[in-house]
Amino acid sequence: MNLDRLNILLVCNLGYSTGIMVAKMKEVAASSKKLQDVPMDIIAYPAGELREHIENYDVILVGPQIKHQFAELKKLADEHNKPIEVIDSKDYGTVNGANILKSAILLKVNHEKGN
C-alpha cells in the first residue's frame, strides 16, 4: 500500500458525536509506523455541510446514526467522484478508530484502483 496522502471526512448529524472518533483515528494514525509519514487530515462536519467541504477530502465516512441519509449523501459524493460508506455500527459504538481508519484506507485504495 502506497498512500501519498489521506484526507478523511466524517459526517454525522451535528458534527459533535464523531469528534471522539476523529481523535481516536488521529491517535491510531500517529502511532502507526506505516502511516506516520503519510500527510493526513481527519475531520468531522455535519452532513448538511458536506457540499462545502467535499472537494478537500479523499473519502467520506458516514456516521451510522444518519445512514438513512446515505442515498442523498452518496449522490453528492458520486457527483464529485468521492468514495463514501457508512461506518460500521459496532466499530463506531466501541470507538474502534483502528478499524475505521483501515476502512477509510481500503475505501481510498479500492476507489483509486477502480479509476
Image (cartoon, rainbow, N blue to C red):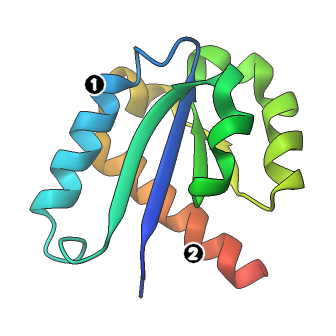
The kind of residue on which mark 2 rests is Val
Secondary structure of the residue carrying tag 2 is helix
Q: In which quarter of the image is residue 32?
A: bottom left
Of the residues under marks 1 and 2, which one precedes in the sequence?
1
Task: Assess disc 1: are there few (<14), some (14-19) or many (≥20) residues with their C-alpha within 10 Å of its C-alpha.
Answer: few
Position in image of residue 31 (x %, y %)? 10, 60
Position in image of residue 21 (x %, y %)? 32, 31
* Image position of 59 with respect to 64: above or below: below
The residue positioned 44% from the left and 65% from the top of the image is 6
Image quarter of the C terminus: bottom right
The residue positioned 30% from the left and 42% from the top of the image is 97
Position in image of residue 40 (x %, y %)? 34, 62
Secondary structure of the residue carrying tag 1 is helix
Q: In which quarter of the image is residue 48?
A: top right
Residue 102 shows up from this direction = yes
* Image position of 110 with respect to 63: above or below: below
Q: Residue 20 carries which label?
A: 1
The kind of residue on which mark 1 rests is Ile
Q: Which mark is residue 109?
A: 2
Left or right of 94 on screen, residue 87: right
Mark 1 vs mark 2, CA separation in Å: 25 Å
Q: Of residues 33 and 5, which is closer to you in this image? A: 5
The residue positioned 24% from the left and 48% from the top of the image is 26
